[in-house]
Amino acid sequence: MKQGIHPKYDYVVFRDRAADFAFLTRSTVGSAETVEWEDGKTYPVIDVQISSASHPFWTGKSRVLDDEGRVAKFYKKYGKTPAE
């Protein structure tokens, strides 16, 4: 392997704060923020917005993000009905 051209590949903690879930893996991503892991060592930590612990596909729980469609919102906002 050629020296000096590859990014540093080391242990990193990925943390999903919404689900209170974290896992340790290896990555080329780095961070100035650190966290103490279960083994007593300190690792860089990357906060992610979604992980397997919070994603509806993996959890089986669907989240309702939009109760009504875009067109219905438009008609509601501008006071028209679809039949007009």
Image (cartoon, rainbow, N blue to C red):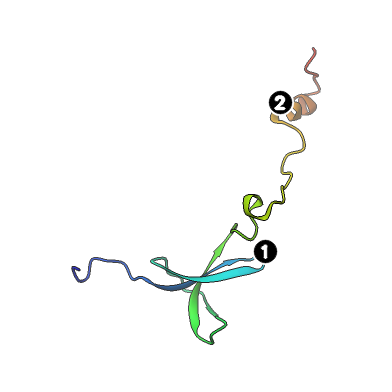
* Lower position in the chain sequence, tag 1 or tag 2: 1
User: Tag 2's secondary structure?
Assistant: helix
Reading the image, the residue beneath label 1 is 19
Q: Which dot marks residue 72?
A: none
Residue sitting farthest toward the top: 84
Q: Which residue is at the front of the view, 56 or 15?
A: 56
Q: Is residue 11 left or right of residue 47?
A: left
- The quadrant of the image that shows the N terminus is bottom left
Q: Quick one: label 2, few (<14), some, or many (20+) residues within 10 Å?
A: few
The percent position of residue 72, horizontal first and vertical second, equals: 75, 27
Q: Are marks 1 and 2 in contact (CB under 8 Å)?
A: no
State how far apart marks 1 and 2 are (Cα). 32 Å
Q: Position of residue 71 (x, y in %)?
A: 71, 26
User: What amino acid is found at the position of numbered circle 2 in the picture?
Assistant: Val
The residue type indicated by label 1 comes to Ala
Q: Position of residue 80 (x, y in %)?
A: 80, 19
**Residue beneath the point at 50% across and 85% down:** 41
User: Residue 59 at x, y = what percent?
Assistant: 67, 55
Q: Residue 75 is drawn in which quadrant?
A: top right
Q: Residue furthest left?
A: 2
For this orientation, the residue located farthest to the bottom is 40
x 47%, y 72%: residue: 12
The secondary structure type at the circle numbered 1 is: loop
- Binning the other alpha carbons within 10 Å of mark 1 as few (below 14), some (14 to 19) or many (20 upward) gives some
Q: Residue tagged by mark 2?
A: 71
- The quarter of the picture where the C terminus appears is top right
Instruction: Name the image quarter holding residue 78.
Output: top right
Q: With 63 as the anchor, is 48 left or right in this view?
A: left
Q: Left or right: 46 with respect to 20? A: left
Residue drawn at x 36%, y 70% as measured from the top left: 9
* Above or below, comparing residue 15 to residue 38 in the picture: above
| Residue sitting at x 23%, y 66% | 5
